Amino acid sequence: MTKKTSNRYSPEVRERAVRMVVDHGGDHASQWAAIGSIAAKIGCTSETLRGWVRQAERDQGLRPGPTGAEGERIKALEREVRELRQANEILRKASAYFAQAELDRRFRP
């Protein structure tokens, strides 16, 4: 199952929104309240902004989990593995086809 996403917000907008959450966190009762307030101002959902904040925290080493660069590397490696498995399957089928063709050719009178 693939997830369809769009990059409606530029990296600059994302960075600014995260910076606003960090800067104005003390003005609100909780980080979630700050996220809700700032998300309404920039026009995204609170959950979207929360994800950006969590990823920024992982990138800075404040939260456990893969950083953005590690996530991109994992995606690239998974894509490469998928392509190699497809190529191996094609080669396996081609090998079986030609082996069968060779057997059929040998036993013809």
Image (cartoon, rainbow, N blue to C red):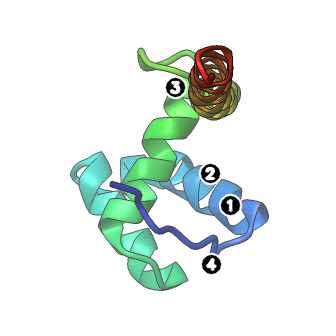
State the separation of the CA atoms marked 4 and 2: 18 Å
Q: Are marks 4 and 2 in contact (CB under 8 Å)?
A: no
Q: Residues within 10 Å of mark 2 (few under 14, many from 20)?
A: some
State the separation of the CA atoms marked 4 and 1: 15 Å
Q: Nearer the viewer, mark 3 or mark 1?
A: 3
105 or 72: nearer the viewer: 105
Residue type indicated by callout 3: Arg
Residue on which disc 1 sits: 16
14 or 74: nearer the viewer: 74
Residue on which disc 3 sits: 58
State the separation of the CA atoms marked 3 and 2: 14 Å
Residue type indicated by callout 1: Arg
Q: Are marks 3 and 2 in contact (CB under 8 Å)?
A: no
Q: Residue at position x 49%, y 54% from top? A: 21
Residue on which disc 4 sits: 8
Q: Which of the 4 image quarters holds residue 82?
A: top right
Q: Residue at position x 62%, y 78% from top? A: 8
Residue type indicated by callout 2: Arg
State the separation of the CA atoms marked 3 and 4: 22 Å
Q: Nearer the viewer, mark 3 or mark 2?
A: 3
